[in-house]
Image (cartoon, grey):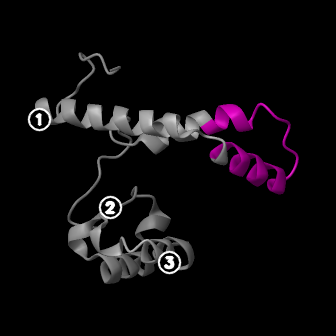
């Protein structure tokens, strides 16, 4: 996926040199071939992952809007339907991803930025005491 989709997309958008690549520490994501690929195209300085100098805090709802908003949102929509086959599942996910509005995505990003600002003010400490709704 990285080699056949992500890299060509970044090259097409001419953004490869300006992006920091972030991923979780799932075992398939830190295999040696993945590490080599990421070091070749992003260098150690532009990868945030468990196998690199800059690690990403695991399971942090404050820092992972895809894990804690997008996937939950999609699961709620996708599983409203009766899915019989893997093809049905893939089609449903694709349909709902494509129907996600720009405003919904913008709101998720704004909320993530807001949480990052609070985390910075709290110097990385827990932030439950704050109202996390803007």
Q: Earlier in the sequence, mark 1 or mark 2?
A: 2
Q: Nearer the viewer, mark 1 or mark 3?
A: 3
Left or right of 10 on screen, residue 79: right
User: What's the residue at 63%, 46% (across, down)?
Assistant: 97
**Majority SS type along the magenta span:** helix
Q: Secondary structure at mark 2?
A: loop
Quadrant in the picture for residue 15 = bottom left
The answer to whether 114 appears left or right of 123 in the picture is right
Magenta-colored span = 74-97
Query: What is the distance, in whole Å, between disc 1 and disc 2 at their CAs?
Result: 21 Å
Q: Circle 3 — which element?
A: helix
Residue 71 lies in the magenta-colored region:
no
Residue at (36% x, 76% y) in the render = 38
Say which label, 3 or 2, has the lower sequence index. 3
Q: Position of residue 3 (x, y in %)?
A: 51, 79
Q: Secondary structure at mark 1?
A: loop
According to the picture, the residue beneath numbered tag 2 turns out to be 49
Foreground pick, 9 / 41: 9
Labels 1 and 3: the sequence-earlier one: 3
Pick the front one: 128 or 4: 4
Is residue 20 left or right of 102 when viewed as pictured?
Answer: left
Mark 3 Cα shell of 10 Å, populated few (<14), some (14-19), many (≥20): few
User: Local crowd at mark 2 within 10 Å, few (<14), some, or many (≥20)?
Assistant: many
Image point (29%, 52%), residue name: 56
* In the displayed structure image, the side of residue 31 where residue 94 appears, left or right: right
Residue 128 drawn at (x, y percent): 27, 20
Residue in the image at 84% along x and 43% along y: 83
Q: Quadrant of the C terminus?
A: top left
Q: Considering only vertical position in the picture, is 86 above or below 34?
A: above
User: Magenta segment: does it hold 86?
Assistant: yes
Disc ID at residue 123 = 1
Residue carrying label 3: 8
């Amino acid at each position: 996926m990285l080699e056949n989709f992500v890299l060509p997309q970044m090259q097409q958008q001419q953004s490869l040199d300006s992006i920091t690549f972030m991923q979780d520490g799932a075992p398939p994501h830190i295999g040696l071939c993945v590490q080599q690929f990421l070091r070749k195209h992003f260098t150690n300085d532009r990868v945030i992952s468990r196998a690199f100098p800059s690690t990403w805090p695991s399971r942090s709802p404050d820092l992972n809007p895809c894990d804690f908003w997008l996937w939950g949102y999609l699961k709620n929509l996708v599983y409203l339907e009766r899915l019989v086959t893997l093809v049905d599942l893939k089609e449903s996910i694709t349909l709902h991803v494509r129907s996600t509005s720009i405003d919904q995505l913008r709101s998720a990003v704004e909320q993530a930025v807001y949480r990052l600002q609070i985390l910075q003010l709290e110097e990385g400490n827990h932030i439950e005491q704050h109202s996390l709704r803007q």
